[in-house]
Amino acid sequence: MPRVVHFEIQADDPERAANFYRNVFDWKIEKWKGPIDYWMIMTGEGVGIDGGLVKRPVDLKAKGNINAFVCTIDVSDVDEYLHVVQANKGTVERPKEAIPGVGWLAYLRDTEGNLFGIMKSDKNAK
């Protein structure tokens, strides 16, 4: 069955976006040494995926909102990360809510307007 193997974040200001994700999630983000401006994102060891960061294409931006998959990030404490995201100029789009029997979920936007989720697994969530 096909699996997600890489994610990509588009940004008007890649350096600003890189700083946001470094500060919020402590991700390692390095500029790629290839022929295009691209930053590699390493999210950690173990289960999960790594991704990339790229300047938002002007032609797509001119057409309006870009639809994309929403990536959800596993966190140790949703409330804590809601505060950290806001302290780093991100915004809360949908506050923490229980997904019964699964965990706690919230949706946020980064400094570039990209939507992402954060989740803490908790089978007792109600």
Image (spheres, rainbow, N blue to C red):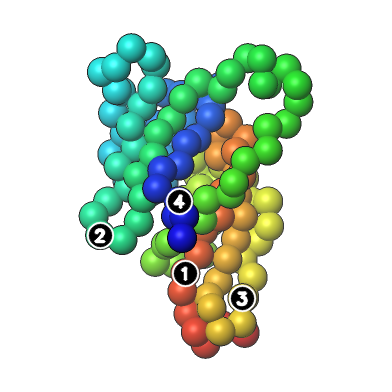
Q: Residue sitting at 38 percent across and 14 percent down? A: 36
The kind of residue tagged 2 is: Gly
Q: Earlier in the sequence, mark 2 or mark 3?
A: 2
Q: Earlier in the sequence, mark 2 or mark 1?
A: 2
Q: Position of residue 82 (x, y in %)?
A: 53, 56
* Residue identifier under label 1: 120
Give the numbered dot on residue 79.
none
Q: Position of residue 73 (x, y in %)?
A: 46, 56
CB-based contact (under 8 Å), mark 1 and mark 3:
no
* Residue identifier under label 3: 99
Q: Position of residue 1 (x, y in %)?
A: 46, 60
Front residue of 118 and 50: 50
Between disc 2 and disc 4, the foreground one is 4
Estimate the spatial distance between the alpha carbons at disc 2 and disc 4, rounded to whole Å. Answer: 15 Å
- Label 4 secondary element: loop
Which residue is at the far top? 35
